[in-house]
Image (cartoon, rainbow, N blue to C red):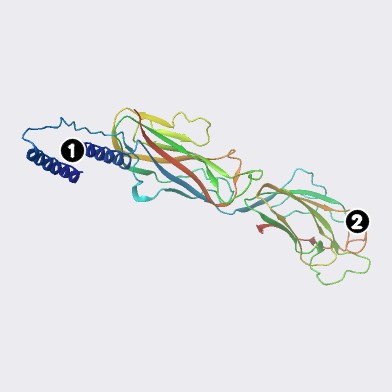
Amino acid sequence: MGAQRILAGLATALAAASVLAGPAAASSASASEMSVTGSAPQVCAVQNPVVGAGALVNFRSLNGTTLQIDRLADPTTLATSAALADIRFAAVCNYPHRITLESDNNGLWRGGSAGAAPPPGFADGVPYTATLVWGPVNSRFEADATGRRVRQSTVPVDEATAGDIEIHLAIQAGASNLRANAPLIAGVYTDTLRVTVEPQ
Amino acid sequence: MKTLLRASILALAALSAGAAQAADDTDSVGPMPVTGDVPAMCSAGAVEGGDTVFALGVIVDTATGFLLSDLTAPPKTLAASFCNTRSTISISATPMTAQAFAGPAPQGFSNAVDYTATASGWTDPAARYNTGEAAHPDATQTRPTAFTGDITVDVSAFTTVGGNTLRMVADPLYQGLVTVTLAAVS
């Protein structure tokens, strides 16, 4: 009886050892995990301009990045002639950013005579507006020709945006830096408009 | 275990001697059956080299923002995998998603990348899982015999979730997870 009691105890010990060894040494299923990683850096890109869907009015077609007004002054009154143009830039910014329109001259100004006043009664500057459409942004930029200087407008864009930056340029008939319908002094009138997308 | 058996033998010997002193008759115990059991076991081996990351690097064309069309990463090897019985190999994967970007992707953009994960070397055909598909009929394959060997895990065919007309939102980390499971089948 004493021997049977010890053997029973031994059998219990062996069974316990077997139960403990099973799960620790083997598993009926085994998994291995691996991750797949990559990064998308911040990208802002703007392509060269093209003429948009709207008609060019009193503008010649785009030559590279130069947009030339066909006839700035009315030949009979010398007052500013109206002109309209739609320009598009294919663009993308894959993160929140800001877009800036910057005019070198704050309007179209007669070249070669910076600082020299025109003869009395003549205007030498022509204001224009640029309406900007870009994703959720629809803003109006005024190069009002109140002074010859750099002027800029910056708009934050709080989300990634892709598509076309649309700029609608408009010169009103008779607009000048002197008074409505003032005659324009002869010369070449220029401005440079820059579109910049950059981090906020 | 050996120690335990040795102890039990000694105990039996001591008891027999005691019994002999107490009485002149004899006694026996047994028979004692000795049995063992080999459970069904599977092990997906460790990733060779210890590197468990398929690192793709920059995944977009930095001039356009579109997903690169030629993304690749070296395959991984699960070395010395084994199953000592009939088994299945299963592979699953999650799309690579932008980890820092919050909310839905803006119009024209995507924040996730689909791909195909493949585990080969265990069965023919290989187990395959495309994160862009709703059903995954090839994700689990059965091997009728015990086997030991290497499993090669590969990722390929990366596509933009939502279509290739979408660009990827900027994010320093896009991440997905591939899981390979070996399971014994009774």
Name the image quarter holding the N terminus of chain A.
top left
Circle nearer the viewer, 2 or 1: 1
Amino acid type of disc 1?
Gly
Name the chain letter of the residue that bears numbered label 2: A
Total marks shown come to 2
Amino acid type of disc 2?
Gly
Name the chain letter of the residue that bears numbered label 1: A
Quick one: which residue is furthest to the front in this view? B22
Q: Position of residue B123 (x, y in %)?
A: 35, 31
Q: Position of residue B182 (x, y in %)?
A: 37, 36
Which of A64/A197 is in front?
A197
> Residue B21 appears in which quarter of the rendering?
top left
Q: On the image, numbered disc 2 is attached to which residue?
A: A174
Q: On the image, numbered disc 1 is attached to which residue?
A: A2
Question: What secondary structure is found at the residue carrying circle 2?
Answer: loop
- Residue at 7% in and 38% down: B20
Which of B21/A112 is in front?
B21
Specify few, some or many for label 2: CA neighbours under 10 Å numbering under 14, 14-19, or 20 or more: many
Q: Position of residue B140 (x, y in %)?
A: 42, 31
Question: What secondary structure is found at the residue carrying circle 1?
Answer: helix
Q: Position of residue B2 (x, y in %)?
A: 18, 44
Q: Is residue B111 visible?
A: yes
Vertical position of residue A107 compared to residue B23: above or below:
below
